[in-house]
Image: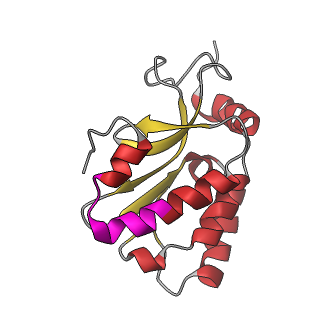
Amino acid sequence: MKSEAKTPDEYIDALPEDRKVAVKELRKVILKNLPRGFKECISYGMVGYVVPHSLYAKGYHCDPKLPLPFLAFASQKNFIAVYHMGIYGDPKLLKWFTDEYPKHSKAKLDMGKSCMRFKKPDQIPYKLIGELTSKISPEKWIEMYEKLYVKHK
């Protein structure tokens, strides 16, 4: 469900009531743990956290006019999704997350390459998402991104 919202507040205000509480809590825990330098915005129709052009002028390689994406969340039709690019790019971080997850949730982990899907809002491991959010600074993400995704000439 791609949103046409222009701000994170608009995005959340447009959600069905049963999703608002969970998404507000998710946003709160992300903002509390987000390392300094990332910027909150609407990115690809989701609430996103990006490295702004002021820190990484090259922008996103898929579209350099866009800031470098790092983390996002969205209320999809059948689940709430959290997208964390660091998990996709760092096998050690992925292992840490998958090892920690059962300590924070009784639900089976439903995960893609960078996407965690939570079918029931009460299954979201907020504390774990907060810890995950805190683990990569913008500078570290830029370093990882440059190694993994940018073709060097």
Q: Is residue 74 above or below residue 120?
A: above
Please give left or right for residue 43 compared with residue 135 in the image: left
- Residue projecting furthest to the top: 153
Q: Quadrant of the C terminus?
A: top right
Q: Is residue 52 above or below residue 83?
A: above
What is the magenta range? 14-24
Choose top left, top right, bottom left or bottom right for residue 68. top right
Front-most of 58 and 99?
A: 58
Is residue 77 visible in the rendered image? The answer is yes
Q: Report the residue at 70% width, 63% height from top.
A: 131
Count of residue discs? 0
Q: Residue 19: x percent and y percent?
A: 34, 67
The image's colouring method is secondary structure
Please give left or right for residue 125 compared with residue 146 in the image: left
Is residue 111 visible in the rendered image? The answer is no
Q: Report the residue at 72% width, 47% height from top.
A: 136
Choose top left, top right, bottom left or bottom right for residue 92. bottom right
By secondary structure, the bulk of the magenta-drawn segment is best described as helix
Q: Report the residue at 74% width, 42% height from top.
A: 137
Q: Report the residue at 26% width, 45% height from top.
A: 2
Please give left or right for residue 7 compared with residue 64 in the image: left
Front-most of 152 and 38?
A: 38
* Magenta span contains residue 23: yes
Q: Residue 95: x percent and y percent?
A: 67, 65
Q: Residue 62: x percent and y percent?
A: 44, 25
Please give left or right for residue 151 compared with residue 77 in the image: right
Q: Residue 119: x percent and y percent?
A: 35, 73
* Magenta span contains residue 130: no
